[in-house]
């Protein structure tokens, strides 16, 4: 309550929360499971795992936006096979959004973010 002649107390500024890492997971048709990580709304890497095979990490780099304004990231699987990750959220990955990962000769897979 404020009476005449009193100044309203100013609230301290709200500090935004630290940018959380968003994790998107899925599986390719050949059995490789992936876990793509986005920090500060940019995808940085994909972790790959499959039973009976050594796990590996693909580093991603931003390439361009597609015609729909969705960021495309590129990288490679074990330094040889090209891959692309499309951020279907349009650059704002968050829980509930999706990605699409395409790997040369493997096809495409849709991943869900949490």
Image: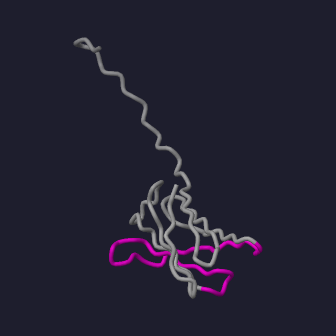
- Which residue is found at the position 65% from the left and 87% from the top? 80
- Which residue is found at the position 56% from the left and 55% from the top? 21
Where, by quadrant of the figure, is residue 37 drawn? bottom right
Q: Residue furthest left?
A: 4
- Which residue is found at the position 22% from the left and 12% from the top? 4
Residue 49 located left or right of residue 75: right
Residue 58 in picture, x, y percent from top left? 64, 74
Which one is nearer the viewer's eye here, 80 or 106? 106
Q: Residue furthest top?
A: 3
Residue 92 located left or right of residue 40: left
Q: Please state, as top left, top right, bottom left or bottom right, where the N terminus lies in the image.
A: top left
Where, by quadrant of the figure, is residue 60 drawn? bottom right
- Which residue is found at the position 45% from the left and 56% from the top? 96
99 versus 30 height, above or below? above
9 versus 42 height, above or below? above
Residue 102 in picture, x, y percent from top left? 52, 79
Residue 103 in picture, x, y percent from top left? 56, 81
The magenta span reads 52-81
Magenta highlight on residue 76? yes
Residue 8 located left or right of residue 107: left
Residue 6 located left or right of residue 80: left
Residue 38 in picture, x, y percent from top left? 54, 62
Magenta highlight on residue 71? yes
Which one is nearer the viewer's eye here, 103 or 19? 103
Which one is nearer the viewer's eye here, 61 or 23? 23
């Amino acid at each position: 309550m404020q009476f005449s002649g009193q100044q309203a107390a100013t609230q301290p500024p709200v500090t935004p929360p630290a940018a959380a890492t968003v994790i998107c997971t899925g599986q390719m048709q050949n059995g490789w499971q992936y876990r793509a990580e986005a920090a500060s709304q940019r995808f940085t890497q994909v972790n790959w795992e499959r039973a009976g095979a050594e796990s590996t990490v693909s580093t991603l780099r931003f390439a361009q936006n597609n015609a729909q304004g969705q960021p495309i990231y590129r990288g490679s699987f074990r330094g040889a096979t090209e891959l692309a990750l499309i951020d279907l959220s349009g650059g704002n990955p968050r829980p509930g959004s999706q990605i699409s990962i395409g790997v040369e000769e493997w096809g495409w897979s849709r991943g869900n973010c949490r």
